[in-house]
Amino acid sequence: MRTDELSVWEFARYALQRNDEAIRFSEAKAGLVLTLTGLVLGLVSSRVAQLVDLLAHLLCWMRVLTIVSMATLLSGIVVVTAASLGIMFPRLHVTDTTSHLNFIYVASISEQQSIDKMSHIESDAALDQTISQVHATAVIASRKFGLMRLAMVGTALVLVGSTIVVLLGYLI
């Protein structure tokens, strides 16, 4: 293997590792956001029951504020849940190329077929397969980061809605 080929291999391996770390980071963040949203829902749920009971007796502006804040809270929970689940359960097919590095492909063939294919692959083809996986993991990481932005918007909705609900609960 030539020196310039080695540096391309190192670059491809670095890019693949970096994409994998970005994917893991998004998944960990989604799990944390989903957990925190569940905790907020648990904390607010006791006050929501009180507010619903007192809704008929509230002043008009407090009634509207209560309904809007609960709607904001619930829409935030739906957004966080949908986005987080989209992050944790991504699409498995992102490219049209069948890669020897893709776990679905490797699992679909026998162990001996896998050994034969991997041991007889030429250097250029192996590099092409690796670069293809860099692209595939970049697409996955990009989708997950986009969904994470959406989950953060949902988190903001949850925080705004829950804060207003809790404050109204203490005022009543």
Image (cartoon, rainbow, N blue to C red):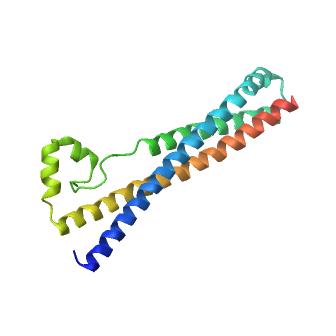
Give residue 149's position: percent from left, percent from top: 55, 53
Name the foreground residue: 54 vs 99. Answer: 99
Residue at 71% over, 30% down: 43
As displayed, is residue 1 above or below residue 48? Answer: below
Residue at 55% over, 47% down: 29
As displayed, is residue 50 above or below residue 31? Answer: above
Image quadrant for the C terminus? top right
Left or right of 106 on screen, residue 152: right
Give residue 115's position: percent from left, percent from top: 16, 50
Give residue 154's position: percent from left, percent from top: 60, 45
Q: State the image quarter where residue 42 is shown.
A: top right
Give residue 63's position: percent from left, percent from top: 78, 31
As displayed, is residue 4 above or below residue 92? Answer: below
Name the foreground residue: 172 vs 24. Answer: 24
Name the foreground residue: 120 vs 54. Answer: 120
Q: Residue furthest top?
A: 53
Q: Residue furthest right?
A: 171
Q: State the image quarter where residue 15 is shown.
A: bottom left
As displayed, is residue 157 above or below residue 57? Answer: below
Q: State the image quarter where residue 10 is shown.
A: bottom left
Number of numbered discs visible in the structure rendering = 0
Image quadrant for the N terminus? bottom left
Residue at 27% over, 51% down: 102
Residue at 69% over, 34% down: 70
